[in-house]
Amino acid sequence: MNYRKSLSIYYSFFRHRLFYPLISVLVALSICLSSALPSQAFDWVPLIFQGVQALQLSNMSDRQEIEIGKQINQQLLNSDVRLYRDANINRYVQQIGQRLVANSDRPKLPFTFQVIDDDSINAFATLGGFVYLNTGLIETAENEAELASVMAHEIGHIGGRHLIKQMRQKAIDEGLLTAAGLDRSKVVQIGYQLARNLPGSRKHEFDADKRGLATLTRTGYSQTAMVSFMQKLVKKGSVPTFLSTHPATGDRIDAIKKAINTQPNNGNYGLDNSTYKTNIQALLRS
C-alpha cells in the first residue's frame, strides 16, 4: 500500500514538473509571436487542424508542386483549353519531351507534355512538370530540333521554379500571404491565372534559355535550332503569342549565340526536315 502511494505521489510530481514548464513555454511563445508580428497575427487553432491546406511558396516540396500542377491542369482543361487528341502526335511529343527531361535539371520529376488544339504559336509550362504546346507551334517548327528547343525552354522554366516564384510575388503584391502560408485553393487560382496570361520576366526568360540550351545540348540536338526558331518567328512580322509573353527576344537571341560560341557542340540531331514532316503528317492533314 505504501509503495502504491509513493508511486502515485511521484507520478503526480513528475507530471506537474513537466506540465507547467511546457505551459510556460507555450504562453511565452504566443506572447512573442503576437507582439513581434502584430500585422501577421492569425488564429493558431485552425492552423493546427487545417495546416495541411496551407502552403509555403518559398519551400514547396516536389510532391506539393505536382499536386498543385495537377489541379491547375484540371482548371485549364475545364476552361477553353482543348487538347489535340491524335495519338500519334501526342506520342511523338511525349517521346521528345522525355528524352529532354532525362537531361534536364529535374530528371526525376514526372513531366507531362500535352498538345493544345490551337493554331496560335504558343507554349507554356506550369507546376509539377506540366508543359503545353499549341498545334500552331508544332506546325511552325521546321524540324524536330526546333520543336525540342521550345520544349527545352519550357522545361527550363520548371527547372528554375519560375512560376512558383511569380506566384509568391503575386501573393505578396496582393497581400494574400500570412505567416502560415497560402491557402491551397488560392495557390491553384493564382497559378491558373498566371498560366493563362503569363507576363514573362526578363530574368526568368534568360534563365530558361540557359537551362534549355544546356538540356538541348546534353540530349544531342543541334544548338542552332533554338536560334533559328526564334529568328523565324521574328521574321514573321506580327509577334506571335509565344514571343509576346516572352520579352527581349533580340537580346535573348544574342545571348544564346554567345553561349553557343563559348560552349560549342557537335550535336546535330533533329535537323531532318522531311522526317519531321512525316512524324507530324496527321497534324498537317487536319
Image (spheres, grey):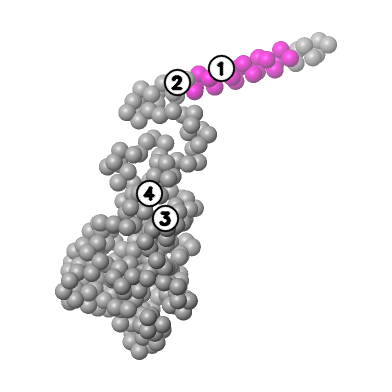
Can I make out residue 103 in this image?
Answer: no
For image coordinates 30% across by 46% down, the residue present is: 170
Q: Quadrant of residue 258?
A: bottom left
Marks 2 and 4: CB-CB under 8 Å?
Answer: no
Marks 4 and 3: CB-CB under 8 Å?
Answer: yes
Instruction: Give me the C-alpha separation between circle 2 and circle 4.
Output: 37 Å
Per the rendered image, the range of residues in magenta is 8-26
Find the residue positioned furthest to the right: 1
Precedes in sequence: disc 3 or disc 1? 1
Q: Check disc 2 and give the amino acid type.
A: Ala
Precedes in sequence: disc 2 or disc 1? 1
Instruction: Give me the C-alpha separation between circle 2 and circle 1.
Output: 12 Å
Q: Is residue 40 above or below residue 149?
A: above
Residue 88 left/right relative to 206? right
Q: Check disc 1 and give the amino acid type.
A: Tyr
Place of residue 20 in the rendered image (x, y in percent of width and height, measured from the top left):
56, 17
Place of residue 37 in the rendered image (x, y in percent of width and height, measured from the top left):
35, 28
Q: Which residue is mark 4?
A: 189
Place of residue 178 in the rendered image (x, y in percent of width and height, measured from the top left):
37, 36
